[in-house]
Image (cartoon, rainbow, N blue to C red):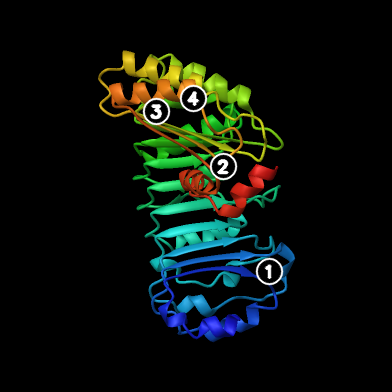
Amino acid sequence: MFKLLSRYSERWVQLRIQMIADLAPHMESLRGCLPALRRLWVHWDHEDSSKAVDAIECFDTAPSLVDVGLDNISDFCTREYLLFPVEQLTCYRVCAPWSIHQEVLELAPNIVEASISWLNLPMRALLDKVQDLPRLRRLYVSNLKFLKYLRAPVLSEIAMILKDREDIEVFDAFVERSACALRRLCLNGLPDCELSAGILNAHRSITSLALITHSWPDPDYETLDSYLILLRAAAVHPQLEEIHLGVMTRSSVAPIDYALVLEMMQSRRDVLQSVAVFAAHVGCADSFHSSPGPVVQAKLDVFTKESGVELWMGSGPEIRERIHSWTYMTPTELDTLLEA
């Protein structure tokens, strides 16, 4: 089947491939035959499969390739294993050891969006060197320790997992070092409200907040409700113009208190009349109990019509993709967090 499809490789603009060790030798036939390929996603079926392959070299000569994603590769892989035209990349989403990230980022000054992640702990020792990313505007890091070694002066959006006060210190130092004006913050996994409140109070340029809760078997609804109650006090973080709520779960428990969402929006809109635009996006990755119910839905409809507030709600597989886009993460990593 692959040989049949590869006959049309000169037409490919995007390629997403589930890689197995037996397929790797056939990839060499693509070398020099990918003139239009702009976006590449390679996911290994198992980490052990990537150990069995020396390198995949066919993408290194793709002249149009600007967006690369790689996932589930071995801890033992080196930069030479990941051969693609680094200098021309504008989008980089890779789950790999930090040593690989560092080597790639040094050669990729044009990156605008990056997902820098590594799920296997402990991490290898990090080199004490700060990497400049002069064009980076959107960033996800799976571990805030990575921020100690980055500088991004034009960064406007960041997604991250916030765990404790030490993480806040690392984050604050990164923002100060970068001298960037952040506009959007996505918290993937809900920390204590006090931790996120500290960041929002310290960085008033943030006007868009995305909150994603995910755990197995049930998300942390109590913490999610605590955030809604906190945000219901309109004097808290008055700069926020957008609030996004995402629930990643396979649980059959009702995921979101829509009545509380309504109260939060009403309170903020009534007090913050100076806010020109306010939007609330609420999404559930699965369809269980995703409806607010007829009574609350009617109130939501009236409120949005009279106030001009934009409210978007949805559930199901397509919402998973939307929530995924908030994080700039690799799809497999988001699924891994869901199942953790």
Residue 69's x, y, as percent? Answer: 52, 61
Residue at 43 percent across and 13 percent down: it is: 233
Name the residue carrying label 1. 50
304 or 217, which lies in front?
A: 304
Identify which amino acid the numbered label 1 is placed on.
Ser
For marks 2 and 1 on the same chain, the one whose residue lies earlier in the sequence: 1
- Contact check, label 2 and label 1, Cβ < 8 Å: no
For marks 3 and 2 on the same chain, the one whose residue lies earlier in the sequence: 3
Name the residue carrying label 4. 294
Residue at 59 percent across and 43 percent down: it is: 143
Name the residue carrying label 2. 285
261 or 18, which lies in front?
A: 261
Q: Can I make out residue 59 in this image?
A: yes
* Circle 4 or circle 1, nearest the eye: 4
* Circle 3 or circle 1, nearest the eye: 1
* Residue at mark 2 to residue at mark 1: CA–CA distance: 30 Å
Report the number of numbered marks: 4
Name the residue carrying label 3. 203
